[in-house]
Amino acid sequence: MPVPRRFDRRPPERDATRINERIRVPEVRLIDDEGNQIGVLKTADALAFAQERDLDLVEVAPEARPPVCRVLDYSKYKYEQAQKLKQARKHQQQITIREIKFRPKIAQHDYDTKKHHVERFLRQKDKVKVTIMFRGREVTHPERGIAILDRLAEELAELGVVEQHPMQEGRNMTMMMAPSKAVLAGRLDAGRGADAAAVDGAPAQAPAIKPAAPNGGAASEQPPAASEQPPAASEQPPAASEPVSVDGSGPAASTAVP
């Protein structure tokens, strides 16, 4: 069964700007719809002046003596005020405070991980509250916490500045870091983008266009490969022909000369 909502006894919000019959003062300083000073008039006369032009009598400066009223279209006036407020909020820069907690005996891997988180928060233009948590007798060695905080501030000096130096409160030591001017201006991110583009290397070159064959056909991609090695010459010269006998049956006998 749903829980019934409590009855809200607060009155509904009402527009605090007084217009037309809601202006109760006896006289006002009137400004017409063109911005000209009319002077001090009775409230009834000023209201009649506005009604003749089908406009509203709006109190714009209730603290003045007498109050200042203008003749204008109140609906259009409210719309313009809302647009101005919207533009002002758009240009406002909201800073969020993040918190990262360290231990005095933190390991190197855990330190690198938390340092990466702090770097990410600073690049997002957020403030970072770095806290060192002491337990037991660790509180008797605050120099360990100061060493960690000083090391972190030194390694992230390019991204953030120390807004509040290390300060110990009970068992916790805190330091506040804010994004640097380079991060707020966006110059640091632009430099990183340029470096990344340089690492990627030069753009790829366009492939060379091959000339077409004279007969209109496709040109051969590669010329025919020449013989890599010349034909091997005979390693030994041909043997001299032996003398043959007259009848051709066999080699002739050599005749000894005395």
Image (cartoon, rainbow, N blue to C red):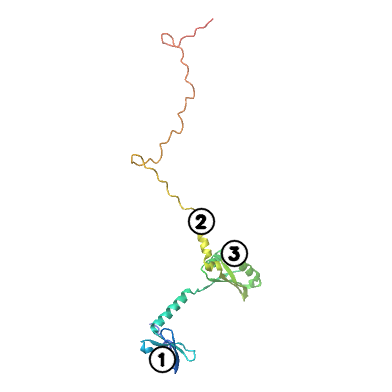
- Helix, strand or loop at mark 2: helix
Residue tagged by mark 2?
198
Work out whether mark 2 precedes mark 3 in sequence or the reverse, and give the earlier one: 3
- Amino acid at dot 3: Glu
Left-right relation of 72 to 166: left
Of 145 and 50, the residue lying toward us: 50
Residue drawn where x is 39% and y is 87% of the image: 56
Of 228 and 21, the residue lying toward us: 21
Q: Position of residue 194 (x, y in %)?
A: 51, 59
Residue closest to the far left: 216
Q: In this rendering, which labeled residue sits more in front, label 1 or label 3?
A: 1
- Quarter of the image for the N terminus: give it: bottom left
- Helix, strand or loop at mark 1: helix
Of 66 and 240, the residue lying toward us: 66
Residue 194 makes an appearance in the image? yes
Residue tagged by mark 1?
46
Residue drawn where x is 59% and y is 63% of the image: 108
